[in-house]
Image (cartoon, rainbow, N blue to C red):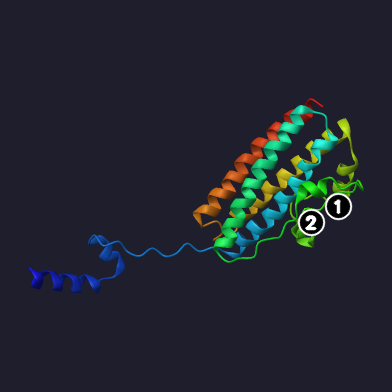
Amino acid sequence: MLRLVCPLLLMMATLPAPLVAQQGVPAAQPPVRYTPSDVTFMQGMIGHHAQALVMCALVAERSSHPQLALLAERLSVSQQDEIAIMRQWLEARGLPVPALAPVVRDARDTTGHAPAPGHAEHTHAAHTMPGMLSPAQMDTLARARGASFDRLFLEYMIQHHEGALVMVAQLLATADAARDPMIFQFASDVDTDQRAEIRRMRALLATR
Protein backbone atom coordinates (compact mmCIF):
# COMPACT_ATOMS: atom_id res chain seq x y z
CA MET A 1 0.00 0.00 0.00
CA LEU A 2 2.86 2.42 0.83
CA ARG A 3 4.41 1.87 -2.59
CA LEU A 4 1.09 2.83 -4.24
CA VAL A 5 0.44 5.93 -2.14
CA CYS A 6 3.87 7.55 -2.42
CA PRO A 7 3.97 7.70 -6.25
CA LEU A 8 0.43 9.13 -6.19
CA LEU A 9 1.44 11.90 -3.80
CA LEU A 10 4.53 12.61 -5.89
CA MET A 11 2.41 12.93 -9.03
CA MET A 12 -0.08 15.28 -7.33
CA ALA A 13 2.76 17.48 -6.10
CA THR A 14 3.77 18.15 -9.69
CA LEU A 15 0.27 19.01 -10.92
CA PRO A 16 -0.81 22.65 -11.48
CA ALA A 17 -2.87 24.14 -8.63
CA PRO A 18 -6.25 23.88 -10.44
CA LEU A 19 -5.66 20.17 -11.14
CA VAL A 20 -4.57 19.53 -7.58
CA ALA A 21 -7.79 21.16 -6.37
CA GLN A 22 -9.75 18.85 -8.67
CA GLN A 23 -8.04 15.86 -7.04
CA GLY A 24 -9.50 16.94 -3.67
CA VAL A 25 -6.55 19.01 -2.44
CA PRO A 26 -7.62 22.69 -2.01
CA ALA A 27 -5.51 25.18 -3.94
CA ALA A 28 -3.99 28.05 -1.99
CA GLN A 29 -6.11 31.20 -2.27
CA PRO A 30 -4.31 34.47 -3.08
CA PRO A 31 -4.44 37.02 -0.25
CA VAL A 32 -7.07 39.73 -0.52
CA ARG A 33 -5.38 42.91 -1.71
CA TYR A 34 -6.33 46.49 -0.98
CA THR A 35 -5.69 49.51 -3.13
CA PRO A 36 -4.58 53.07 -2.38
CA SER A 37 -8.21 54.09 -3.04
CA ASP A 38 -9.38 51.74 -0.28
CA VAL A 39 -6.90 53.25 2.17
CA THR A 40 -7.78 56.82 1.21
CA PHE A 41 -11.48 56.04 1.63
CA MET A 42 -11.06 54.59 5.12
CA GLN A 43 -8.73 57.35 6.31
CA GLY A 44 -10.86 60.09 4.81
CA MET A 45 -14.13 58.69 6.13
CA ILE A 46 -12.72 58.74 9.68
CA GLY A 47 -12.24 62.51 9.41
CA HIS A 48 -15.63 62.84 7.72
CA HIS A 49 -17.35 60.96 10.56
CA ALA A 50 -15.42 62.98 13.14
CA GLN A 51 -17.02 66.20 11.95
CA ALA A 52 -20.46 64.61 12.31
CA LEU A 53 -19.60 63.74 15.92
CA VAL A 54 -18.72 67.38 16.59
CA MET A 55 -22.03 68.48 15.10
CA CYS A 56 -23.95 65.99 17.24
CA ALA A 57 -22.11 67.11 20.38
CA LEU A 58 -23.48 70.63 19.86
CA VAL A 59 -27.11 69.50 20.07
CA ALA A 60 -27.44 69.08 23.84
CA GLU A 61 -26.72 72.73 24.67
CA ARG A 62 -28.29 74.36 21.62
CA SER A 63 -31.53 72.51 20.90
CA SER A 64 -34.62 71.84 23.00
CA HIS A 65 -36.20 69.52 20.42
CA PRO A 66 -36.43 65.96 21.89
CA GLN A 67 -36.55 64.30 18.47
CA LEU A 68 -33.40 66.10 17.38
CA ALA A 69 -31.63 65.02 20.57
CA LEU A 70 -32.62 61.41 19.89
CA LEU A 71 -31.45 61.69 16.28
CA ALA A 72 -28.10 63.14 17.36
CA GLU A 73 -27.63 60.33 19.87
CA ARG A 74 -28.30 57.67 17.21
CA LEU A 75 -25.97 59.37 14.77
CA SER A 76 -23.20 59.61 17.37
CA VAL A 77 -23.43 55.91 18.20
CA SER A 78 -23.40 54.81 14.58
CA GLN A 79 -20.56 57.15 13.61
CA GLN A 80 -18.41 56.07 16.57
CA ASP A 81 -19.01 52.40 15.77
CA GLU A 82 -18.00 52.94 12.15
CA ILE A 83 -14.89 54.91 13.15
CA ALA A 84 -13.86 51.94 15.32
CA ILE A 85 -14.29 49.59 12.36
CA MET A 86 -12.22 51.82 10.08
CA ARG A 87 -9.47 52.22 12.68
CA GLN A 88 -9.28 48.45 13.19
CA TRP A 89 -9.03 47.84 9.44
CA LEU A 90 -6.17 50.33 9.11
CA GLU A 91 -4.34 49.15 12.23
CA ALA A 92 -4.55 45.50 11.16
CA ARG A 93 -2.63 46.43 8.00
CA GLY A 94 -0.10 48.67 9.70
CA LEU A 95 -1.48 51.76 7.95
CA PRO A 96 -1.62 55.31 9.39
CA VAL A 97 -4.74 56.10 11.40
CA PRO A 98 -5.89 59.75 11.57
CA ALA A 99 -5.54 61.19 15.07
CA LEU A 100 -8.75 62.61 16.51
CA ALA A 101 -9.10 64.76 19.60
CA PRO A 102 -12.02 64.30 22.02
CA VAL A 103 -15.06 66.04 20.60
CA VAL A 104 -17.35 66.39 23.61
CA ARG A 105 -14.93 68.64 25.48
CA ASP A 106 -14.32 70.74 22.36
CA ALA A 107 -18.04 71.06 21.65
CA ARG A 108 -18.42 72.93 24.95
CA ASP A 109 -15.89 75.58 23.96
CA THR A 110 -17.09 78.72 25.73
CA THR A 111 -15.88 80.98 22.93
CA GLY A 112 -18.90 80.03 20.84
CA HIS A 113 -16.69 79.13 17.90
CA ALA A 114 -16.95 75.85 16.04
CA PRO A 115 -15.05 73.07 17.84
CA ALA A 116 -12.29 71.04 16.24
CA PRO A 117 -12.44 67.23 16.15
CA GLY A 118 -8.73 66.69 15.57
CA HIS A 119 -5.93 66.77 13.07
CA ALA A 120 -7.92 65.03 10.32
CA GLU A 121 -10.47 67.82 10.37
CA HIS A 122 -7.98 70.56 9.73
CA THR A 123 -6.19 69.31 6.66
CA HIS A 124 -6.96 70.80 3.26
CA ALA A 125 -7.98 67.34 2.05
CA ALA A 126 -10.54 67.05 4.85
CA HIS A 127 -12.19 70.34 3.94
CA THR A 128 -12.40 69.36 0.27
CA MET A 129 -14.08 66.01 0.92
CA PRO A 130 -17.66 65.90 -0.36
CA GLY A 131 -20.22 67.18 2.12
CA MET A 132 -17.76 68.50 4.68
CA LEU A 133 -18.88 71.72 6.36
CA SER A 134 -16.62 74.71 5.88
CA PRO A 135 -15.17 76.49 8.95
CA ALA A 136 -17.71 79.27 8.37
CA GLN A 137 -20.61 76.80 8.37
CA MET A 138 -19.34 75.13 11.55
CA ASP A 139 -19.01 78.53 13.21
CA THR A 140 -22.55 79.48 12.18
CA LEU A 141 -23.91 76.22 13.57
CA ALA A 142 -22.03 76.61 16.87
CA ARG A 143 -23.44 80.13 17.36
CA ALA A 144 -27.07 79.21 16.59
CA ARG A 145 -29.65 78.37 19.24
CA GLY A 146 -33.18 77.00 19.39
CA ALA A 147 -35.21 76.61 16.20
CA SER A 148 -32.49 78.25 14.12
CA PHE A 149 -29.98 75.67 15.33
CA ASP A 150 -32.40 72.81 14.67
CA ARG A 151 -32.91 73.89 11.06
CA LEU A 152 -29.19 74.43 10.41
CA PHE A 153 -28.24 71.14 12.03
CA LEU A 154 -30.62 69.16 9.84
CA GLU A 155 -29.67 71.00 6.66
CA TYR A 156 -25.95 70.68 7.34
CA MET A 157 -26.14 67.03 8.40
CA ILE A 158 -28.08 66.18 5.24
CA GLN A 159 -25.33 67.92 3.26
CA HIS A 160 -22.76 65.96 5.25
CA HIS A 161 -24.46 62.59 4.66
CA GLU A 162 -24.92 63.26 0.96
CA GLY A 163 -21.17 63.86 0.79
CA ALA A 164 -20.53 60.45 2.33
CA LEU A 165 -22.73 58.88 -0.36
CA VAL A 166 -20.57 60.58 -2.99
CA MET A 167 -17.43 59.16 -1.36
CA VAL A 168 -18.90 55.65 -1.44
CA ALA A 169 -19.93 56.04 -5.08
CA GLN A 170 -16.46 57.27 -6.01
CA LEU A 171 -14.85 54.29 -4.29
CA LEU A 172 -17.09 51.73 -5.97
CA ALA A 173 -16.53 53.38 -9.36
CA THR A 174 -12.74 53.11 -9.01
CA ALA A 175 -11.13 50.23 -10.88
CA ASP A 176 -10.00 47.37 -8.60
CA ALA A 177 -11.16 49.20 -5.45
CA ALA A 178 -13.41 47.60 -2.81
CA ARG A 179 -12.31 44.08 -3.78
CA ASP A 180 -11.68 43.37 -0.11
CA PRO A 181 -15.04 41.90 1.08
CA MET A 182 -14.82 43.88 4.30
CA ILE A 183 -14.32 47.17 2.44
CA PHE A 184 -17.19 46.43 0.06
CA GLN A 185 -19.55 45.46 2.90
CA PHE A 186 -18.60 48.50 4.97
CA ALA A 187 -19.08 50.92 2.07
CA SER A 188 -22.42 49.31 1.23
CA ASP A 189 -23.57 49.60 4.85
CA VAL A 190 -22.56 53.28 4.99
CA ASP A 191 -24.56 53.91 1.83
CA THR A 192 -27.66 52.12 3.16
CA ASP A 193 -27.54 53.65 6.66
CA GLN A 194 -26.92 57.21 5.54
CA ARG A 195 -29.69 57.11 2.96
CA ALA A 196 -32.09 56.01 5.69
CA GLU A 197 -30.86 58.77 8.00
CA ILE A 198 -31.25 61.38 5.25
CA ARG A 199 -34.89 60.34 4.83
CA ARG A 200 -35.48 60.71 8.59
CA MET A 201 -33.81 64.11 8.69
CA ARG A 202 -35.77 65.41 5.72
CA ALA A 203 -39.00 64.28 7.38
CA LEU A 204 -37.97 66.03 10.61
CA LEU A 205 -36.93 69.16 8.73
CA ALA A 206 -40.34 69.30 7.08
CA THR A 207 -41.95 69.64 10.52
CA ARG A 208 -39.78 72.59 11.57
- Circle 2 SS class: helix
- Circle 1 SS class: helix
Spot occupied by residue 79 in the image (x, y as percentages of width and height)? 67, 45
Is residue 169 among the parts visible in the rendering?
Answer: no
Spot occupied by residue 90 in the image (x, y as percentages of width and height)? 59, 60
Spot occupied by residue 65 in the image (x, y as percentages of width and height)? 80, 28
Q: Which residue is rendered at x = 50% and y = 64% of the image?
A: 33
**Rendered-image quadrant of the N terminus:** bottom left
Q: Amino acid at mark 2?
A: His
Q: Which residue is tagged 1?
A: 135
Answer above or below: position of 124 versus 74: below
Give the side of residue 64 with respect to residue 187, left or right.
right
Is residue 28 among the parts visible in the rendering?
Answer: yes
Q: Which residue is tagged 2?
A: 127
Q: Quadrant of residue 5?
A: bottom left
> How dense is the environment of label 2, judged by Cα within 10 Å: few (below 14), some, or many (20 and up)?
some
Give the side of residue 28 with respect to residue 130, left or right.
left
Q: Amino acid at mark 1?
A: Pro
Answer above or below: position of 57 versus 116: above
Q: Which residue is rendered at x = 76% and y = 32% of the image?
A: 68
Give the side of residue 138 with respect to residue 180, left or right.
right
Per the model, the C-alpha gap separating discs 2 and 1 is: 8 Å
Give the side of residue 77 with respect to residue 16, left or right.
right
Q: Which residue is rendered at x = 70% and y = 42% of the image?
A: 76
Q: Quadrant of residue 173?
A: bottom right
Residue nearest the viewer, comparing 203 with 53? 53
> How dense is the environment of label 1, judged by Cα within 10 Å: few (below 14), some, or many (20 and up)?
some
- Marks 2,1: beta carbons within 8 A: yes
How many tags in the picture? 2
Closer to the chain start, of discs 2 and 1, is 2
Residue nearest the viewer, comparing 165 with 69? 69
